[in-house]
Amino acid sequence: MHYFNGFSLKNEEDLFSDYLIQSDYCVAGFSYGAQKAFEYASTTDKRIDRLILLSPAFFQMQQKSFIRMQLHYFKADKEAYIGQFLKNAAYPSSMDLTPFLHLESKEALESLLTYQWEKQKIEALQKKGISIEVFLGAKDRILDAKEVFGFFSEVATCYYLKDGGHLLQGR
């Protein structure tokens, strides 16, 4: 399996072992990593049977002022911003994500916040025979899970975990 890490995280894939498939033909990513996994699947010539998107970062419906505000807070105090991000990502669990911490750049945050998911690219992957699965937690504090579900449910198999947060875990 080829796995892509979430924003400011590294080696967190074991947190998602219930959802991942250990196969040479599986690509997966969490949050920001879901964007990267999707782009990898869209551009590689390697065989992929399944693309797993775990809480895919989805901010294309946000106002530009929201994105500017996020970048401003990140620039003002990177460590505080990422600390709060990790708490929000862990909710509703009390999991400590600091063992997985890997500080990202402002450019990575900007890429995450401005990324545009394209249904045409999703459909192109499906035409290549790639099965796409999206996992979302209803209690996600990072993204609007209902909005993300509304977008992806038209073009992918979606799983909506009513007690899960961004990490797809409950308390």
Image (tube, rainbow, N blue to C red):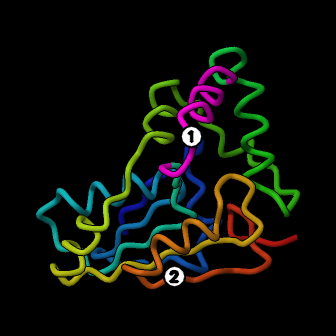
Quadrant where the C terminus is found in the figure? bottom right
Percent position of residue 61, x then y:
52, 51
Residue in front for this viewpoint, 33 or 141:
141
149 horizontally vs 124: left or right: right
Vertical order, 132 against 12 (above or below): below
Snapshot quadrant of residue 75:
top right
The percent position of residue 168, horizontal first and vertical second, equals: 69, 70
At label 2, which amino acid type do we have?
Cys
Q: Is residue 62 magenta?
A: yes
Q: Nearer the viewer, residue 18 or 53?
A: 53
Quadrant of the rendered structure where residue 154 is?
bottom left
Type of the residue with mark 1: Gln
Question: Which one is in front, 105 or 116?
Answer: 116
Classify residue 67 by image quadrant.
top right
Q: Residues within 10 Å of mark 2 (few under 14, many from 20)?
A: some
Prevailing SS of the magenta stretch: helix
* Side (left or right) of 117 relative to 105: left
Judged by depth in the image, the label closer to the viewer, 2 or 1, is 1
Q: Which mark is residue 31?
A: none
Magenta residues span 60-73
Could you say whether the residue bearing mark 2 is in a helix, strand or loop? strand
- Residue 144, x across and y down, in percent: 65, 60
Q: Which residue is mark 1?
A: 63
Q: Which residue is mark 2?
A: 158
Residue at image location 63% in from the left, 70% down from the top: 146
Could you say where residue 31 lies in the image, as x and y percent from the top left?
54, 55
